[in-house]
Image: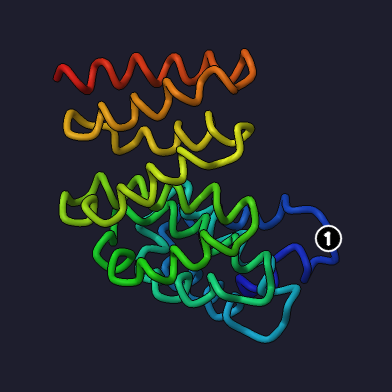
């Protein structure tokens, strides 16, 4: 049985269990050839196969990002796909590999920002992780990306604030601690109690970052 034939759609299944199991299998045996086959399916014309393939790819990226890192350009290309599942799935994949290929992602920052500005909720959520990892990767990247990230935290929906701030916390450091602290303190009063508790933990992290 080929790798593609192990996809849920090829087994007449409507759930994601087989796709997740396939991702785990590919990671367990470092099957780069198998990943290449999944990439081909992801880029192919069969929509059901492509949808299952992006699920396999981003699930594999969560476990072993080095397995899919070489395909950053493909994920960047599909951020603009008319197939929304491929678009947000590609952003999830990028979020898992940004720390491995930050130079590739940064060189295509305009593409990521465009998807962030026009994409779905899932796309936006994961773009915050991409931005944070870019900021953490290189001070030169941070000069351009940090303003995007901080402006988002100033203006995002209150319901998203805590989660997005947690994603951004990857790049907290002594140089930006005061900026993030100011944003979180100003927005905290407008959040729910549970969200305020999450922000309070981040403020403690920022206090530590600011004094380290």
Q: Is residue 128 above or below residue 77?
A: above
Residue name at image x 43 percent, y 71 percent: 111
- According to the picture, the residue beneath numbered tag 1 turns out to be 13
Residue 66 appears at what percent x and percent y? Answer: 35, 57
Residue lying furthest bottom? 45
Residue 179 appears at what percent x and percent y? Answer: 29, 32
Q: Is residue 112 left or right of residue 115?
A: left
Q: Nearer the viewer, residue 129 or 93?
A: 129
Residue name at image x 43 percent, y 25 percent: 184
For the C terminus, the image quarter is top left
Q: Nearer the viewer, residue 75 or 36?
A: 75
Residue 152 appears at what percent x and percent y? Answer: 46, 45
Q: Nearer the viewer, residue 130 or 45?
A: 130
Q: How is the image coloured?
A: rainbow
Q: Is residue 160 left or right of residue 67?
A: right
User: Badge 1 local density, few (<14 within 10 Å), some, or many (20+)?
Assistant: few
Q: Is residue 145 left or right of residue 55?
A: left
Q: Is residue 164 left or right of residue 169?
A: right
Question: Helix, strand or loop at disc 1?
Answer: loop
Residue 65 location, quadrant: bottom left
Q: Is residue 15 above or below residue 194?
A: below
For the N terminus, the image quarter is bottom right
Residue 162 appears at what percent x and percent y? Answer: 53, 29
**For the image shown, how many numbered marks are present on the structure?**
1
Residue name at image x 40 percent, y 21 percent: 202
């Amino acid at each position: 049985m080929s790798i593609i034939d192990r996809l849920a759609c090829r087994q007449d299944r409507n759930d994601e269990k087989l796709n997740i199991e396939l991702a785990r299998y590919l990671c367990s045996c470092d099957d780069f050839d198998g990943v290449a086959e999944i990439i081909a399916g992801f880029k192919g014309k069969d929509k059901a196969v492509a949808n299952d393939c992006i699920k396999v790819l981003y699930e594999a990226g969560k476990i072993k990002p080095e397995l899919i890192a070489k395909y950053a350009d493909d994920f960047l290309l599909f951020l603009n796909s008319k197939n929304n599942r491929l678009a947000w799935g590609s952003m999830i994949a990028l979020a898992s590999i940004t720390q491995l290929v930050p130079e590739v992602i940064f060189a295509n920052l305009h593409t990521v920002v465009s998807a962030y500005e026009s994409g779905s909720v899932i796309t936006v959520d994961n773009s915050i992780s991409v931005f944070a990892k870019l900021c953490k990767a290189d001070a030169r990247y941070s000069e351009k990306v940090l303003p995007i990230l901080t402006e988002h935290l100033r203006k995002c929906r209150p319901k998203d604030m805590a989660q997005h701030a947690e994603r951004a916390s990857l790049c907290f450091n002594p140089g930006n601690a005061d900026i993030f602290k100011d944003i979180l303190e100003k927005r905290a009063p407008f959040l729910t109690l549970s969200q305020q508790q999450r922000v309070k933990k981040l403020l403690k992290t920022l206090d530590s970052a600011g004094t380290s």
